[in-house]
Image (cartoon, grey):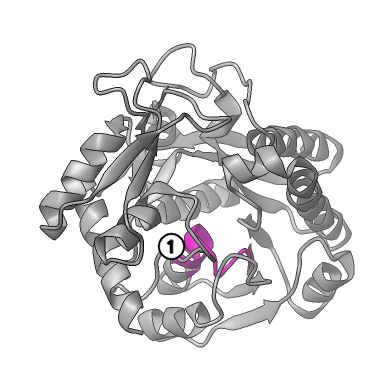
């Protein structure tokens, strides 16, 4: 059985869906700190599978241990973490306590109950300001904000834990910028309050919930002055986790790979693509840069293809189409 933490969150819910659709037995956990309970029913609707779910906080070691006692957990996919860069700059202690504390709680249970396969949700923020692009896995690690620091520290913890624990294997998957939603329109990114991420903010501007989009910095050293990122469809990202788990099951080897498209897209180009898909003009205002941000970040994903046989299938227009479908359908539910 696979334990998925943060199972009703954005990436967790899409991966849970892919796992169930591929016939895996899964127990999901979440505390709904940045998600909604109805995701469980929607996943059940998509997959036509009975789901297993427990509500709780992974930093609560007693809660986690109870999960491991009740279910025969053989693999963990760990998504539960606070994830907003700007918020982490303002609330660093909260981020260290939650993101590091949750990982330690899980690893304690893994050791006690001999769970030896662990997929970790890392981030391209571990690279900091890129010395060159595209970024490969050998790029120096130098995160520029507390959120990135928690991912960097977590990778170190996993390495040390694996070195001290026989048979334990892990994969660190360094995500770039997930957007999009499930093609059904039933699950997608649904943060509480005003979104921190670009795409959910943009879609709320498109449907009239927010007045305009704020772009953080128009003076970056890029072609149009706005930040450049590697946007990846969340379903492609979810499939990367299944590929990583398949590799761990057949190899006694830990590994780290980038999950991205290998293409950089500016904020303005993303807006143009969304406007083309939705036929809705997006009002925006360029304001000051945001603390902890960087100019350009996109992946060299070639190692993921070579090692675990994974690559992306969705293009930018499909990402925008699926994001907009999700926004329209979620507004009606």
Which x, y percent locates residue 100?
A: 78, 46
Q: Is residue 315 above or below residue 76?
A: above
Q: Is residue 322 above or below residue 89?
A: below
Element type at marker 1?
Answer: loop
Q: Residue at x 56, y 23 (%)?
A: 128
Q: Residue at x 47, y 73 (%)?
A: 20
Q: Is residue 60 above or below residue 137?
A: below
Q: How many marks?
A: 1
| Start-end of magenta stretch | 3-16
Q: Kindly identify which residue carries mark 1.
A: 189
Let me know if residue 253 appears in the view: no
Which x, y percent locates residue 303?
A: 43, 29
Q: Specify whether 196 is left or right of 265.
A: right
Which part of the image, by quadrant, shows the C terminus? bottom left
Q: Specify whether 29 is left or right of 41.
A: right
Q: Specify whether 29 is left or right of 185.
A: right
Q: Residue at x 61, y 82 (%)?
A: 52
Q: State yes or no: residue 11 in magenta.
A: yes
**Residue 307 figure quarter:** top left
As rendered, which of 93 and 148 lies closer to the eye?
93
**Residue 27 figure quarter:** bottom right
């Amino acid at each position: 059985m696979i334990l998925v933490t943060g199972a009703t969150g954005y990436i967790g819910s899409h991966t849970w869906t892919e796992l169930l659709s591929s016939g895996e037995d899964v127990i999901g956990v979440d505390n709904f700190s940045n998600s909604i309970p109805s995701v469980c029913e929607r996943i059940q609707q998509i997959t036509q599978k009975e789901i297993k779910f427990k509500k709780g906080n992974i930093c609560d070691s007693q809660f986690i241990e109870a999960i491991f006692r009740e279910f025969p957990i053989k693999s963990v996919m760990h998504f539960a973490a606070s994830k907003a860069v700007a918020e982490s700059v303002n609330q660093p202690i909260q981020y260290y306590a939650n993101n590091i504390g949750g990982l330690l709680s899980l690893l304690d249970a893994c050791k006690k109950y001999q769970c030896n396969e662990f997929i970790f949700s890392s981030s391209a923020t571990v690279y900091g300001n890129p010395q060159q692009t595209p970024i490969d896995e050998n790029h120096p690690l130098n995160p520029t904000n507390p959120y990135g620091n928690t991912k960097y520290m977590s990778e170190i913890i996993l390495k040390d834990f694996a070195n001290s624990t026989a048979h334990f294997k892990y994969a660190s998957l360094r995500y770039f910028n997930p957007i999009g939603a499930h093609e059904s329109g039933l699950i997608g990114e649904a943060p509480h309050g005003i979104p921190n991420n670009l795409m959910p903010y943009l879609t709320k501007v498109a449907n009239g919930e927010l007045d305009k989009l704020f772009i953080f910095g128009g003076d970056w050293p890029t072609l149009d002055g706005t930040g450049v990122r590697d946007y990846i469809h969340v379903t492609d990202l979810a499939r990367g986790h299944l590929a990583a788990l398949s590799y761990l099951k057949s190899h006694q080897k830990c590994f780290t790979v980038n999950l991205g498209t290998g293409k950089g897209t500016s904020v303005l180009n993303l807006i143009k693509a969304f406007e083309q898909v939705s036929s809705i003009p997006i009002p925006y205002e360029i304001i000051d840069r945001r603390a902890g941000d960087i100019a350009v970040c996109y992946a060299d994903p070639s190692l993921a293809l070579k090692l675990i046989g994974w690559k992306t299938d969705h293009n930018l227009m499909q990402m925008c189409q699926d994001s907009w479908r999700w926004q329209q359908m979620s507004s009606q539910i």
